[in-house]
Image (cartoon, rainbow, N blue to C red):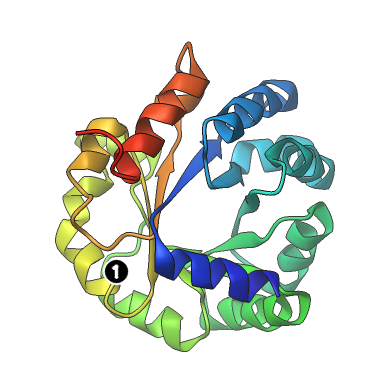
Amino acid sequence: MIRENILQSLKQRKHLQVALDFIDLEEAVKVAEKSVDAGVDIVEVGTPLLKSSGIGGIKRILEASRGRAVLADTKTADAGDVEVQIAKLGGASIMTVLGIMDDSTIESAVKKARELDILVQADLINVKDVITRAKELKELGVDIIGLHVGLDVQKKRGITVAALKEEIREISKFTAVSVAGGLNGNTIRDLLDIPISIYVVGGAITKSKDPYSATKEIVNIIRGNTK
């Protein structure tokens, strides 16, 4: 099963996920292909790309990903079961729900995801007590907890997800953790001693003049191939 295979892989090693937060699908495909060539593990159809390109966009990214897991960043706020189906129709292996939303939405997504063999990741963006909510979400059946400092908060407060080290440590004790928000090679180096399952990198790769080299550098950092 796809779901079980990915969960097992997350337990075994650290993964790099590239966040394709584009509006233009063709630009996203080009970066996806270069990132895959450089060794990225998970390819994310970012929320802007999902809104602009829909199920067809997920399918194009899936094709470009050549066997890598694809995450559809649906950031589901309601109708969890329906949005799981949308992600699955595009061929995604992981979809996201907003952890701040009502438990009924989370439960709806989890139930349908188990039926369709897809993982649910809860995005804790704007959640105040992330540890307590992460425990609740784990009990509801969520597969991955995503600790995420959004772009607007990064700009306003000048912080990245690296500011949440203690919270990441605590949550990683009971579930797979994905971290996103201003990550690059340097910030990832500072987080390597924490049991993080997925490092999500956006602009450091997608805005680079050479996405292949940018990805390769981060892959080497995560896999310990460079000092």
- Where in the figure is residue 223, as x and y percent of width and height? 34, 45
Q: How many marks?
A: 1
- Where in the figure is residue 128, as x and y percent of width and height? 27, 65
- State which quadrant residue 134 falls in: bottom left
Name the residue rendered at 78%, 40% in the picture. Answer: 63
Describe the element under mark 1 as helix, strand or loop.
helix
Q: Residue furthest top?
A: 209
Name the residue rendered at 79%, 66% in the picture. Answer: 85
Name the residue rendered at 77%, 68% in the picture. Answer: 82
> Which of 91 and 189 lies nearest the eye of the viewer?
189
Q: Is residue 147 left or right of residue 26?
A: left
| On-image quarter of the N terminus | bottom right
Vertically, is 171 above or below 32?
below
- Where in the figure is residue 154, as x and y percent of width and height? 29, 37
Kind of residue indicated by mark 1 = Val
In this rendering, does residue 57 appear at all?
yes
In this rendering, does residue 125 appear at all?
no
Vertically, is 30 above or below 210?
below
- Where in the figure is residue 62, as x and y percent of width and height? 74, 44
Vertically, is 45 above or below 175?
above
Near mark 1 (Cα within 10 A), the count class, few <14, some 14-19 or many ≥20, is many
Vertically, is 125 above or below 44?
below
Q: Is residue 157 left or right of residue 42?
A: left
Q: Residue furthest bottom?
A: 139
Q: Which residue is mark 1?
A: 130
| On-image quarter of the C terminus | top left
- State which quadrant residue 157 falls in: top left
